[in-house]
Image (cartoon, grey):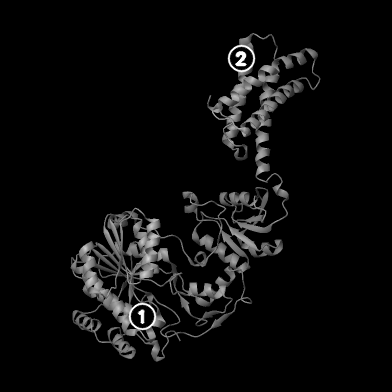
Amino acid sequence: MPGIAKVNARSVLALLHDIVAVAVAWIGAYLLRFNFELPEAFSSELRQTLVWVVPVQGIAFFALGLYRGIWRYASVNDLRRILYAVVLGAGAIPLFFWMLRLEVVLPRSVLIIYPALLLLMMGGGRLVYRLWKEQTLFSDIKWSGEPVLILGAGDAAASLAKELALNTAWRVVGFLDDDEDKIGTMLNGVRVLGRLGELANTVQRLGVTQVVIAMPSVSHRQRKRATSLCVKAGVKVMTVPAFEDLLSGRVSISQLRAVELEDLLGRDPVQLDEVGLHQQLAGKVVLVTGAGGSIGAELCRQIARYMPGKLILLDAGEFALYNIEQDMAKRFPQLEIAYLAGDVRDTARLEQVFEEYQPSVVFHAAAYKHVPLMEQDNAWQAVRNNVYGTWCVATCSQKYGVEKFVLISTDKAVNPTNVMGATKRLAEMVCQGLQQPGGTRFIIVRFGNVLGSSGSVIPKFREQIASGGPLTVTHPEVTRFFMTIPEAAQLVMQAGYMGKGAEIFVLDMGEPVKIVELAKDMIRLSGLNEDDVSIQFVGLRPGEKLYEELIAGEEHTLPTPHPKLRIAEARTVSAEDMQSLLAWICSEQIFSGNAVRARLKQWVPEYVSASNGIQAGI
């Protein structure tokens, strides 16, 4: 029989428990039948039949594999097997007595009471054991541990509360949920106290300092609201993993993580044209320049999901290239990837790369992006890298028959007040000027700041909080657009697929965020307040402006089939101007910062140099 194959000490103890339960249930059935006044004749019959009932029922237990499970993990399936075994045994007992022709008179009520008692004792025994092992037998009277409030009262919240009950460091004191039908109900012995909007009053009344958001399947807007309520209430906040991670089995509900700024500023996932992107990228050779940067690296990870024939990663920085090589080798070991060191201004190296690998799609993310650094002593290098480098990669793409060239641009190219923004606007114009009918299709994508990118304000604030502050903010009114790095990379890919040539795609960046409010949120998310970490205003840096725009005043946008993408109708460069521009950016001469700014003003009339004392928005 399958249950006899392996018997260990735990199985022997379980068997002994069940044998005793059989005996007690059989005796109990007789006693209940006769109201505990058992006649002598039936007492003798009880003893005679008991010696046969135990082995018959035991055989039924083994036949249905009752001893292959572990009591600590007893479940509904185990209870179902117990039920089948009890019913099988109860039916076999009278049949067995008939076959042996035993002269006994079994009261019919005994055959009904016996299986009910046996099922109760066997199932109840396993339940009590599991509750005892999981330390939840008396969990309703748990008084130790830090009080914690759970936002959400669904399946995830119930599972989380059950797992937290095993941890002596935590004590769940209640749930909050906006579902009116759940308010006042109990989950694992803990009450749903009210709506999410009552969070501030609830934590104050209960003395709660720790809140867990357990709503993995709701929209990001709802999770964002829950996070905002926690931040305003001044409590420490954690969250369960995303629904996709739970569904995949990569993590469990109890693997809590701290809420990050991305949970406050991020948005609902991007809906991609998976079929179209697969057609564009699968089996193709794809080149990413600036592959070691924040956007470039994320582009590589997103592109790899579509299984290109080969992925070419080009970067001028050795350490950045090493980092992305380590990451990609771990994530996509089966993918063929080339890691190439090279500068986008090195035409000989570009010729070698394009001739050897023959890419079909190019994502050009290589650029100098740090506004103050490019403004002060590196203006000409910004022109050479951002404009000339773009021209070098773009012309190689044309020469070697690349299907699509996608330029990563920036909102700082709109009404620029700095060298970096003006050079990116020139790079856009170069790509538009190179567009020819039937040739490589040049697509430009503009977007604002991305959360956590190298050189951005978020990592800087984290470092300042870790060192005790102060947090340095340039101006009380300065605002910026933000999106997550994965969202930006996905929309760049989507725009690349949709582009027909020479379009400037503008990403929907949502609402602008005040940097000072961002700083305050980060302080609160760290479990501190402004008394612990101060905020200091240091003034706008060279080239910075109070706010960013995604389209210039004279530009208009057209809708696209994708809700987060629009097309800007921007001024293009004439063929004559293009030749003059190329003569300047290809020059081997080195120009001073003032000379560069003067020429940028000539090519980009909307450029107003902040270095001349003019700050946009003031």
The answer to which of 62 and 349 lies nearer the viewer is: 349
Residue 286 drawn above or below residue 615: above
Residue 318 rendering spot, x and y as whole percentages: 35, 70
Q: Quadrant of residue 570?
A: bottom left
Q: Mark 1 sits on what residue?
A: 420
Q: CA separation, marks 1 and 2?
A: 92 Å
Q: Is residue 181 visible?
A: no
Can you say whether 251 is above or below 427 in the image? above
Left or right position of 437 against 267 = left
| Residue name at image x 61 percent, y 30 percent | 82
Task: Report helix, strand or loop for mark 2.
Answer: helix
Q: Tell me if residue 134 comes above or below residue 25 in the rendering.
A: below
| Residue at the spot 57% in from the left edge and 68% down from the top edge | 525
- The amino acid at mark 1 is Met
> Residue 95, labelled with which disc?
2
Q: Return the x and y of residue 115 as percentages of the image width and height.
A: 66, 25
CB under 8 Å between discs 1 and 2: no
Q: Secondary structure at mark 1?
A: helix
User: Which amino acid lies under the numbered mark 2 shown in the image of this protein?
Assistant: Leu
**Residue toward you, 529 or 198:** 529
Number of numbered discs: 2
Vertical order, 154 against 5 (above or below): below
The quadrant of the rendering that contains the C terminus is bottom left
Q: Residues within 10 Å of mark 1 (few under 14, many from 20)?
A: many
The spot of residue 339 in percent (x, y) is: 32, 64
Q: Is residue 114 left or right of residue 332?
A: right
* Position of residue 488 in the picture relative to residue 287 (left or right): right
Image location (x, y in percent) of residue 517: 54, 75
